[in-house]
Image: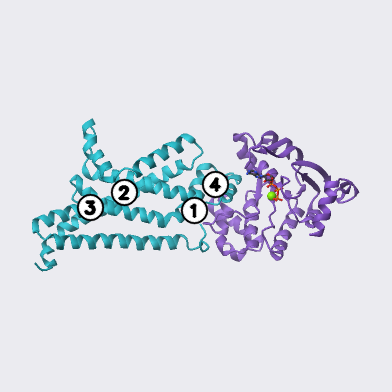
Chain colours: A cyan, B purple
Amino acid sequence: MKFDLSILAKHIPFLLEGAWLTLQACALAVIGSLVLGLVVGAMRTSASPLLNRLAAIYIDIFRNIPFIVQLFFFYYGLPEIGIYIDAFTTGVVALSIAGGAFTSDVIRSGILAIDPGVIEAAQVSGLRKITIFRKIILPIALRASVRPLGSVFINLILTSSILSTITLNELTGSAKIVASNTFRPFEVYFVLLVAYAALTYSVSILIGMLHRYLNRHQEEGAV
Amino acid sequence: MISITGLRKSFGAATVLNGIDLEIRQGEVVSVLGSSGSGKSTLIRCINGLEKIDAGKITVDGFDVSKPRELSEARKRSGTVFQLFNLYPHMTAVQNVALAPIEVLKVPRKQAEAEARELLHSVGLTERADAYPSQLSGGQRQRVGICRALAMKPSYLLLDEVTSALDPEMTSEVLSILAALAKTGTTMVFVTHEIEFARSISSRIAFLDKGQLIADLPTEEFFSATGMALPRVAQFLSKMRKD
Ligand SMILES: Nc1ncnc2c1ncn2[C@@H]1O[C@H](COP(=O)(O)OP(=O)(O)OP(=O)(O)O)[C@@H](O)[C@H]1O
Ligand SMILES: [Mg+2]
């Protein structure tokens, strides 16, 4: 059997649909995990022991359970107690929650790395806590976190292939279908491999650009 | 008026400030002198509420800095300039200066930025107003730091060794700005190791020794027989002059 990609031509629209679903799920999960990471990262660095503890528990739990188990719990477990959510929503929520456990850790380190003197300067000038968080802490922490957040997001894209296990025909799911219909797994999975590589590679290039842009005025090596 | 009565501050078992009584009235320039570790920085940090005090009372124009509700009012009335500048690294000079007026005093952005440019102009930074801190020299950064404090039109300026991270040339450019401020009647609490400069601009000298205020004298008295009669002061001055 020779390697022949042209066999896949008529399946391309179907595969593109899957790719589109992957993009949507990942984009939403990136936003979801970032928002969650900001909230939990802030809790993790807050003065309140309760918030701090809650955040630590969340991070511990979701970083120490395989993603597929979390996903099955949400998709197959929750209906048992009367909670039904469709596969796409479940996938996005699960990815966001799992990703949030990692982004919050990144954001926490970003916050802790801020020169305390800078925050003190903001405090003595009379800025309210929430303003200090929004205008000083967050922008500085995010600038420092672009690269590590990028790694988390790339991992999120890779992990999104697991959503195919809950009947979601995203990129991996649709590739499986095409593979079993055409009996050409080699070609199909070769294309899949290239597609994921291209996706994550472009994300990492974007991240690099964003990092350079946001940190264009910082000293070499400074936070 | 900044009024400090019976101030005590400890870090764990170490009492760093013990029974400080000090009043700073409008228009005064009070230099705080004392050897390293005597508690000068801690005193400043208690006045601007960065450290919680263990006993006594500090009020700024009557607002008690130990009461969370009054602290924000107290902070509106004083501005702090830091040794290591502590500028916001992600904001330009103008943005650094205009942030608090916009957020705290609710000055419209355009107006706040115009005023910030004026302030920066007055310290010779007209050309550097849109530069980021990382693009400025130490002396320029500290001038931005001074403008940031002044932008809130504070009644009191608290300065903690604002030139000790600077080389001599930058030090003199910053000191000349402070001298000009002192002349225009800006009230200052000035922690410094620049003895001669302190002597030239202050109306009073407060001398801290191991957390106690052992002298609070008009400048000329401090540097005359009255001050020299205090062994710790005499020792300190002779040591500083040798360095
Ligand atoms: N956060 C802190 N925790 C524990 N000890 C502290 C803390 N801050 C200051 N101290 C101690 O308090 C004492 C007074 O410190 P402070 O910084 O006020 O001295 P200073 O007069 O400003 O000295 P310098 O001239 O070196 O700046 C020192 O012994 C210092 O070690
Ligand atoms: Mg000090």
Amino acid residing under circle 2: Ala
| Residue named by callout 1 | A140
| Left-right relation of B235 to B76 | right
Q: How far apart are labels 2 and 4 at the CA level? A: 33 Å
Q: Nearer the viewer, residue A31 or B78?
A: A31
Q: Earlier in the sequence, mark 1 or mark 2?
A: 2
Amino acid residing under circle 4: Glu
Q: Earlier in the sequence, mark 3 or mark 2?
A: 3
- Secondary structure type for disc 3: helix
Badge 2: how crowded within 10 Å, few (<14), some, or many (20+)? Answer: many
Amino acid residing under circle 3: Leu
Q: How far apart are labels 1 and 3 at the CA level? A: 33 Å
Amino acid residing under circle 1: Ile
Badge 4: how crowded within 10 Å, few (<14), some, or many (20+)? Answer: some
Q: Nearer the viewer, residue B110 or B183?
A: B183
| Residue named by callout 2 | A29
- Secondary structure type for disc 1: helix
Quarter of the image with the N terminus of chain A is bottom left
Q: How far apart are labels 4 and 3 at the CA level? A: 42 Å
Q: Let me know if marks 3 and 2 both belong to one chain.
A: yes
| Residue named by callout 4 | B103
Q: Eyeballing the image, is B233 above or below B197? A: above
Is there CB contact under 8 Å for labels 1 and 3? no
x, y percent for residue B170 = 69, 63
* Residue sitting at x 42%, y 56%: A146
